[in-house]
Image (spheres, grey):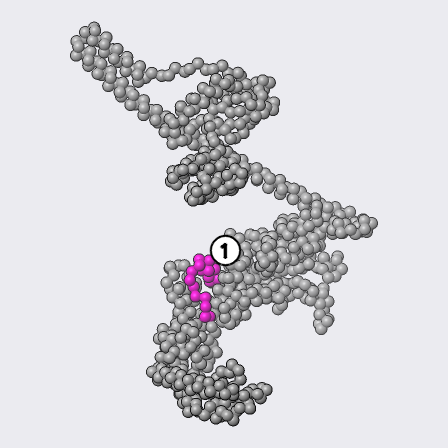
């Protein structure tokens, strides 16, 4: 049951109907829009919702589903039912095209993969659109709505005769017109025209006796008369006879076609019912797409568990304005059935209540609703609404009397499957008495276990919700600092009306506000102030939580990067150890073979002293050659790093590392060092100062080892600091082939990301733009790249690409 009768107007559903009607393609669909009604049966409702959801998926898939010629053929079918009647050409045309649409829709669902559109497929069960009937219509009328010349042999013959006679008529009347023009009997620019279905000439009235023929008409001024020349009387008569014969043959064809159609009328009515349902469901699916609406998980019992619910009409209005609706999380369960929403005026209480009513009503009318996909919804048997001013002079009802009338109906009819919606509960009379009556009504609704959403300013109702099982407080969030509504619903605590604060903010005299504060009483002021403080604390806590979550995300990202680098180093270490072990095995094998050969030589020589000595020398030479180790060179003298002696520009290195960098600044026990293109903060105790000779030695050693490291690990080294020092922030690609350049670009970007370089450049020149396109396509595909742009015009312009890394 829906109460009151004006429910749809009050909740806004009438506007939803109007939008759906606009989205329909024909009166067939609009008829179903008007018939759409509240459905309390869960099984039927589930089917309606599934149909809409399947059509929404169909539209989103971009499938080629017929979307034209949704004609309403019911008037034509009613005419065709009458014996002896026939359908006009326009009616046949509409029937033909709409039947073709029906057949295409049926074919689409039967050819769709099994299980893709199950409920829509069921709509077409038993629907027939006879192919022979469609072919008969197509034989008479073409796709432009014109009668085909070959609809029958006689019709073709009559058409040909008409064309021939009309040609002769045009030539003869042209001769008469030529003579009349030469004599000046016709107005300037005059041409033959049609009057009474016959071809005539316009002649100046004063010369009408000079042209022999029949006057059919004259102009409004009387200066021109229209004469059928005597020479074309017979031709006009012949043409008129041929036209009459052509129409008689056409009527005969249409009557035969109508007789052929008449037995199929019951099947055609079902077919057009199917077409109307498709139009209606298509409109619902389009409406769902405009709302970003979904099918929630639907249960048969009353339940509201919506996440990110939006008021449908408000969302559409805001969408046109480029704004976004603040979504609401709403939950009504058997444990918390009635939500008591409080808060300041214009804070969104009524909108929240209307959102619940409109969205639930839409759902139970078979429409998808604007909530998140993981939302849950249930089915109610009744929805009761009390909103607005309904005072009536005719019925002698005041505003409060009308509210009480609604309350009486709610108490009589509401049960555990009812949804009750009340706006500004208890208002309209003396506050103390109104609040008391409202509290008693609310208690009774809770006793019968009804569900509901009510809005109020009354403190006694907030207190009742706080201490009564089945009731729960809700507050519309408000910014107490700026006195602005946030339009967010928070469940679990009541809201303040902020009446005194708003009065003070708009400039009401201080004395008035202070007097009002005294009249209200300290207890009430303390209660509202406590709510205000809770709101401030809530806002502050939310801001801090947001900052903490932001820092936590950064920490997780940094930890992940560290773990990735650690894994990379571990993998590289294992590769190096594996290679070293392999070389050791080969060396041991060669050494054993040499030892065996030496022993064999000694044995063969009979252990003669000179030959034994010679064999041992050969073995010693092999061992020295294969197993010799480079003795470490004497380390150049290094000055131990000391914050007192260090100064910007000094060359320093991390203790135990081969790379080196330049000191930027020293602050206490911390130094800022530039390694390659990246600045790093390190402790002074971890640094050692390098001499010039040590710097030259390190650079030579790095140059010597670079090719070996590249061959060993494909460019991936273990000494990250050294790679920082030797990394150039510009990659020159000029003259490179495309495939070679791409490999260099990939390796270069990987190194830059690993080393944390903030900005890199690619020198590719202008040319034909191939290298520039390759560089930019690859950079745009990388998540680590924040932006890509041309270099400044003074430094190369579009011949150089600059990439900023995240």
Camera-nearest residue between 24 and 470: 24
Q: List x then y, in percent, for residue 454.
A: 65, 57
Q: List x then y, in percent, for residue 548.
A: 59, 38
Q: List x then y, in percent, for residue 474.
A: 64, 51
User: What stretch of residues is rendered in magenta?
Assistant: 51-70
Q: Quadrant of residue 570?
A: top left
Q: Is residue 63 magenta?
A: yes
Q: Is residue 463 magenta?
A: no
Residue 748 visible somewhere in the drawing = yes
The quarter of the image holding the N terminus is bottom right
**Image point (50%, 29%), residue name:** 676
Name above or below for residue 580 compared with residue 531. above
Name the element at disc 1. Answer: strand
Horizontal side of 616 relative to 158 (left or right) equals: left
**Image point (51%, 57%), residue name:** 294
**Image point (45%, 33%), residue name:** 751
Name above or below for residue 729 compared with residue 94. above
**Image point (39%, 64%), residue name:** 108
Horizontal side of 164 relative to 319 (left or right) equals: left
Name above or below for residue 317 compared with residue 677. below
Q: List x then y, in percent, for residue 65.
A: 43, 64
Q: How many numbered discs sit on the rendered protein?
A: 1
Name above or below for residue 457 compared with residue 805. below
Camera-nearest residue between 348 and 416: 348
Residue pointed to by mark 1: 297
Camera-nearest residue between 473 and 48: 48
User: Mark 1, residues whose alpha carbon is within 10 Å: few (<14), some, or many (≥20)?
Assistant: few
């Amino acid at each position: 049951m829906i109460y009151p009768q004006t429910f749809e107007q009050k909740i806004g559903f009438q506007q939803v109907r109007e939008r759906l009607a606009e989205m329909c393609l024909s009166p067939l669909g609009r008829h179903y829009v008007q018939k759409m009604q509240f459905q309390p049966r869960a099984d039927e409702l589930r089917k309606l919702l599934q149909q809409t959801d399947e059509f929404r998926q169909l539209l989103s898939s971009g499938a080629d589903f017929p979307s034209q010629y949704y004609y309403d053929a019911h008037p034509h079918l009613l005419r065709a039912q009458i014996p002896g009647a026939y359908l006009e050409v326009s009616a046949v045309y509409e029937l033909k095209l709409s039947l073709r649409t029906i057949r295409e829709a049926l074919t689409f669902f039967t050819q769709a993969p099994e299980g893709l559109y199950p409920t829509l497929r069921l709509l077409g069960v038993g629907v027939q659109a006879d192919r022979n009937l469609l072919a008969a219509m197509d034989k008479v009328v073409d796709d432009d709505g014109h009668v085909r010349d070959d609809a029958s042999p006689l019709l073709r013959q009559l058409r040909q005769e008409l064309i021939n006679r009309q040609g002769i008529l045009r030539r003869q009347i042209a001769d008469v017109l030529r003579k009349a023009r030469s004599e000046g009997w016709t107005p300037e620019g005059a041409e033959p025209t049609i009057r009474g279905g016959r071809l005539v000439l316009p002649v100046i009235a004063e010369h009408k006796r000079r042209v022999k023929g029949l006057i059919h008409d004259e102009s409004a001024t009387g200066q021109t008369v229209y004469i059928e020349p005597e020479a074309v009387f017979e031709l006009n008569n012949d043409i008129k006879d041929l036209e009459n014969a052509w129409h008689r043959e056409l009527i005969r064809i249409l009557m035969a076609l109508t007789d052929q159609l008449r037995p199929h009328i019951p099947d055609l009515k079902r077919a057009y019912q199917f077409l109307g349902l498709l139009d209606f469901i298509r409109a619902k699916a389009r409406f769902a797409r405009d709302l970003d609406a979904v099918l929630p998980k639907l249960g048969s019992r009353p339940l509201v568990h919506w996440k990110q619910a939006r008021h449908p009409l408000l969302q559409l209005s805001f969408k046109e304005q480029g704004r976004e609706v603040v979504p609401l999380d709403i939950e009504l369960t058997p444990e918390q059935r009635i939500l008591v929403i409080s808060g300041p005026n214009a804070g969104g209480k009524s909108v929240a209540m209307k959102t619940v009513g409109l969205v639930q009503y839409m759902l139970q009318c078979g429409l998808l609703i604007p909530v998140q996909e993981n939302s849950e919804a249930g089915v109610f048997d009744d929805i009761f609404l009390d909103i607005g001013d309904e005072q009536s002079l005719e019925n002698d009802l005041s505003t409060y009397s009308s509210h009480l009338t609604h309350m009486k109906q709610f108490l009589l009819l509401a049960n555990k499957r009812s949804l009750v919606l009340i706006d500004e509960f208890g208002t309209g009379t003396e506050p103390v008495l109104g609040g008391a009556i409202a509290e008693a009504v609310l208690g009774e609704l809770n006793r019968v276990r009804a569900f509901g959403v009510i809005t109020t300013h009354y403190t006694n109702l907030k207190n009742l919700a706080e201490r009564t099982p089945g009731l729960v407080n809700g507050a519309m969030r408000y910014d107490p600092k700026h006195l602005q509504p946030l339009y967010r619903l928070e469940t679990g605590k009541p809201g303040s009306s902020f009446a005194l604060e708003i009065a003070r903010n708009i400039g009401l005299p201080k004395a008035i506000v202070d007097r009002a504060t005294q009249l209200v009483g300290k207890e009430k002021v303390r209660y509202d102030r406590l709510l205000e403080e809770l709101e401030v604390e809530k806002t502050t806590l939310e801001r801090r939580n947001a900052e903490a979550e932001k820092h936590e995300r950064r920490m997780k990202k940094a930890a992940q990067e560290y773990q990735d680098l650690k894994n990379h180093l571990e993998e590289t270490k294992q590769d190096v150890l594996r290679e070293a072990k392999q070389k050791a095995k080969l060396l041991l094998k060669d050494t054993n073979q040499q030892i065996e050969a030496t022993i064999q030589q000694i044995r063969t020589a009979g252990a003669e002293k000179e030959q034994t000595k010679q064999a041992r020398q050969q073995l010693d030479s092999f061992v020295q050659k294969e197993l010799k180790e480079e003795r470490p060179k004497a380390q150049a003298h290094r000055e131990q790093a000391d914050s007192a002696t260090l100064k910007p520009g000094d060359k320093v290195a991390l203790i135990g590392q081969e790379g080196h960098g330049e000191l930027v600044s020293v602050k206490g026990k911390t130094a800022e060092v530039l390694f390659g293109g990246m600045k790093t903060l390190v402790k002074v105790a971890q640094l050692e100062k390098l001499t010039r000779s040590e710097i030259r030695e390190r650079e030579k050693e790095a140059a010597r080892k670079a090719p070996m490291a590249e061959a060993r690990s494909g460019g991936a080294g273990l000494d990250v600091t050294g790679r920082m020092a030797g990394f150039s922030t510009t990659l020159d690609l000029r003259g490179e082939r495309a495939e070679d350049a791409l490999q260099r670009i990939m390796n270069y970007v990987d190194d830059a990301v690993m080393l944390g370089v903030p900005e890199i450049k690619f020198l590719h020149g202008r040319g034909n733009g191939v290298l520039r396109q390759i560089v930019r396509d690859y950079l745009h595909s990388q998540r680590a790249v924040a932006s890509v742009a041309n270099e400044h015009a003074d430094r190369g312009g579009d011949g150089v690409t600059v990439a900023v890394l995240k």
